[in-house]
Image (tube, grey):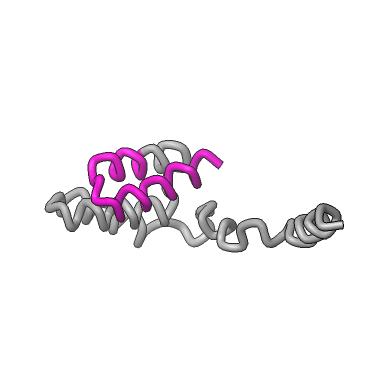
Amino acid sequence: MRYLVDLVRGKVLHRLGRLDEAEAAFRAALATWPGAQSARISLMTLLATGGARREAAALAEAVETAPDAQLDPWWTYWLGDARVYPDIIARLRELTR
């Protein structure tokens, strides 16, 4: 959960133009889940556009050479709360009675 919080925080801060804070959030995500592709790509993009091309290239190389079996929690997030929608809908129906 910590990884996802830091990753999403980094994405939001990046969009807000708060680049130093976004970089710190992406680095925190990587500290929590080293090797996660989505955090590496996010940090790589931020660094490349900011002129830190060497570090961005090193991150790109790490992504390219990572084992196929390396897990990234981001890919389990895309469904979000879908697994609990039936319970949420049932509870909402109860509340409307």
User: Which quarter of the image is occupied by the N terminus?
Assistant: top right
Image quarter (top left, top right, bottom left or bottom right) of the C terminus? bottom right
On the image, which quarter does residue 25 sit in?
Answer: top left
Helix, strand or loop: magenta stretch: helix
Residue at the farthest front position: 97
Residue at 51%, 39% in the rendered image: 2
Q: Residue at the location (78% across, 56% down)?
A: 92
Q: Nearer the viewer, residue 68 or 41?
A: 41
Residue drawn at x 28%, y 58% as measured from the top left: 60
Residue at 21% in and 56% down:
57
Residue in front for this viewpoint, 78 or 52 = 78
* Residue 21 lies within the magenta run: yes
Give how far across and how far down residue 31 sits, in percent.
41, 37
Q: Is residue 23 left or right of residue 84?
A: left
Q: Give the range drawn in magenta.
A: 1-27
Percent position of residue 75, x then y: 54, 60
Query: Which picture quadrant has residue 26?
Result: top left
Extreme residue in the left direction: 51
User: In the shown orientation, is residue 86 left or right of residue 30?
Assistant: right
